[in-house]
Amino acid sequence: MFFLKVTIGQYYPVDSVIHRIDPRMKILLLILFVVGLFFVENLFGYIVSALVLGFTIKFSKVPFIFILRGLKGFLFIVSFTVIINMFFVDSGYVIFEYSFFKLTLDGVWFSFQMICRLGFLTAASSVLTFTTSPIQLTHAIERILKPFVRIGVPAHDIAMMMTIAIRFIPTLTEEVEKIKKAQMARGADFEGKGIKKRAKAFIPILVPLFVSAFRRADELAMAMEARCYRGDIGRTSMRKLRFKVIDYLSLCVGIAFLCSILYLNYSERT
C-alpha cells in the first residue's frame, strides 16, 4: 500500500539548528521553497534545490533514511505521474515510438520535473514535521492565521484540526500495519495477481481502519471535553513565540534561494 511508512506527521526530538528555528519561520521557509520549486525551469535550478534541501536535512540531524521512508510511501503516485508525462507528451524530439506510445525528449524532461518537485516537496514537508512538535505547529498556524480572525476566520479551530490531522497520520499508518498483519494471519492474500483481486483484498483493511479512526476521534473528543477544552476562549500560551537572530538568518537564506532560482530562469531566457 502506497501510504505505508509515511513519515509526515512524526516528530524527531533532537537538538539542532533547524529545531531551534521559530515554527512560523519554518512554515514560511517551506512556502518559499515550494514557490521556488514551481519556478524552476532548468537543471541548475533543481541542483540548487537539491543542495538547499540536502544541507537542511544535514543541519536538522534527522537521519536521511527517515526522509527516504517518506518518499517510498509516495512511490505509486510518482510512478503514475511519470508514466502519464512520459508517454502522453508528444511534443519535442521523438526518442522511441511504438503504436500509439511515443516517448519524446519533452516527455522525459516533464517526468523528471514531476519526480523532483514531488520528491523535494515531500522531503521538505517531512523535515518540517520532524523538526516541529505538534504543539509548536498548532501555535505557529494559529499565529499566522490570527490577523484573519477579524473577518471571521476561526484561526484556533483550523490550527487545531490541521495539527490533529497531521499528528494522526503515523498513528493510522501503524493501525494499518496491525490490521494487515491480523488479516494475513487469518489467511488474507494481499499479493494476488490482478488489480481487481488486490482491491478486494484491501476491503478487510479499510473497514476496520475507518471503525478505528472514528473510535479514536470519539476518544479524543471525550478527552478534550474532560479537560474542559473550549477552544481559544480565555486560552493563553505558556511560551510566547518570538523571532530570534537565527530566524532572520534563515529567512535570508530562503529569500536568497528564491532569488537564485529566478535569476537562473532569467539568465537562461536571455
Image (cartoon, rainbow, N blue to C red):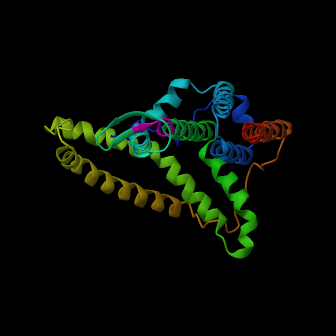
Seen at 46% across and 57% down, the residue is 220
Residue 149 is left or right of residue 107, and the answer is right
Residue nearer the viewer, 159 or 197: 197
The single residue placed furthest to the bottom in the displayed view is 151
Q: Where is residue 92 in the image (x, y as percent from the top left)?
A: 50, 40
Q: Where is residue 251 in the image (x, y as percent from the top left)?
A: 80, 41
Query: Does the magenta run of residues contain 260?
Result: no
Quadrant location of the C terminus?
A: top right
Seen at 32% across and 38% down, the residue is 177
- Note whether residue 3 is visible: no
Q: In this view, does 205 lie above or below 193?
A: below
Seen at 48% across and 34% down, the residue is 71
Q: Position of residue 127 (x, y in %)?
A: 60, 36
Seen at 66% across and 70% down, the residue is 153
Q: Main secondary structure of the magenta part?
A: helix
Residue nearer the viewer, 153 or 104: 104
Q: What stretch is highlighted in magenta?
A: 103-108
